[in-house]
Amino acid sequence: MGNLRFGIFLAPFHPAGENPTLALQRDLRLIEHLDHLGYDEAWIGEHHSAGSEIIASPEIFIAAAAERTRRIKLGTGVVSLSYHNPLWVAERLVLLDHLTRGRAMLGVGPGSLPTDSAMIGLNPTQTRELLETNLDVVMRLLRSDEPVTIDTGTHRLHEARLHLRPYSDFDVAVAAVASPTGPRLAGRHGVGLLSIGATLTQDGFDALAHHWNVMEERAATFGTTVDRGKWRLVSPMYVAETREQAYRDVEYGIEQWFRYFQKVAAFPQMAVEGGNVREMIDFINSSGAGVIGAPEDARAQVQRLVDQSGGGFGAFLQLAHEWANPEATRRSYELIAQHVMPEFQGQAESTRAAKERAMSTREGMAAQQHQAVAHMTEKYQKELANKD
């Protein structure tokens, strides 16, 4: 599969009632931090209700983040495509593609919060049907100059086409949580897949295999090709120097995150269990959902997902959260960059091998060093004697 890419999936999750201006600035600083650490990707979500996931336009956030960063790619994770005119979604991403000089990515989904779609008179079944229609329009606009005329049910296009071609062949990906909606569409169009909930359910590992099987079946049906390098898996993680420290750190905010999914968000696909902090930690670690622990636990989780995926995937995205305070959270990302990413990007083994080679020859090399010093000392003493 080559080197695994690393990134984050930023909903974001902020406690209702806290200062939203500061929270958004904290999100922007996090993207800067990840850029400095060498993370490859950040995907930013779109939500309009429930008071926690407070970014309404990932495109606007990406434009701000792009000006603060140098190399990290920035994706909509995801645009709720069913809510929008697909022509304008395509236009906005092409604009971002030019403004970022190829660092923008388009992730789409039906919209995860029914409290969002209810405000525009759509139910979850309608949003999934609209996703299929609207993604077809977006892909036709991006891949062809032929005009598109269609009545989607919520928007009417008449000979629509892009007047600005993309700057790059930017990545397009479809979100997948529990249903086959995402992998069906990704396979049909030959685009990437964002498996968001695949590790967040008790049968998460089965979901991984199911996602890819659906992708391959749809690709074969429609004559497209699917690339495991464009498959991204999302899993929550928090690491500290020790497991005990990690368990203490997440007491700061993990309960709020769990209660959001248990009591607030009408999003049963993200079923998380736990009545107190210790039960919540145990659920994350024992269900396959993610990791709270030390860097070696994070390495093991990524390897488990690589093995379970049946052939690998292209990117591992941490589900961004604020289980710990901001400083500890930034340190967690740093520890993963320091100790986990090299294992899957071809950078760990070469330095270890060099160390082993040096250790195996150290005794002989040290003896040669001593001989060299003795030789030069003797040579100097002879020079002094000849001078006399």
Image (cartoon, rainbow, N blue to C red):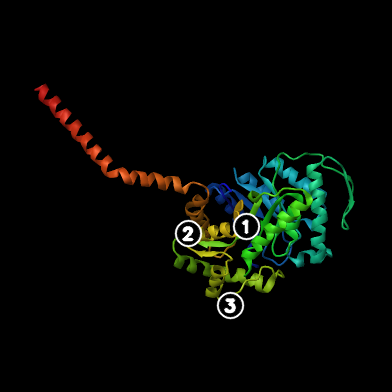
Q: Are there few (<14), some (14-19), or many (20+) residues within 10 Å of tag 2?
A: many
Residue holding disc 2: 295
Of callouts 3 and 2, which one flags the residue occurring earlier in the amino acid sequence? Answer: 3
Q: Which mark is residue 233?
A: 1
Q: Are there few (<14), some (14-19), or many (20+) residues within 10 Å of tag 1?
A: many
Q: Residue at x 36, y 44 (%)?
A: 357
Front: mark 1 or 2: 1
Q: Which mark is residue 129?
A: none
Mark 3–mark 2 distance (CA, rounded to whole Å): 26 Å
Q: Position of residue 251 (x, y in %)?
A: 52, 70
Q: Position of residue 285 (x, y in %)?
A: 54, 68
Q: In the drawing, does residue 385 fall left or right of residue 77?
A: left
Q: Position of residue 243 (x, y in %)?
A: 46, 66
Of callouts 1 and 3, which one flags the residue occurring earlier in the amino acid sequence? Answer: 1
Residue holding disc 3: 275
The answer to which of 41 and 22 lies nearer the viewer is 41
Question: Helix, strand, or loop for circle 1?
Answer: strand
Corner quadrant of residue 80: bottom right
Of callouts 1 and 2, which one flags the residue occurring earlier in the amino acid sequence? Answer: 1
Q: Are there few (<14), some (14-19), or many (20+) residues within 10 Å of tag 3?
A: few
Identify the amino acid type marked 3. Gly
The answer to which of 309 and 144 lies nearer the viewer is 309
Q: Position of residue 332 (x, y in %)?
A: 51, 58
Identify the amino acid type marked 1. Leu
Rendered position, 125 above or below 275? above
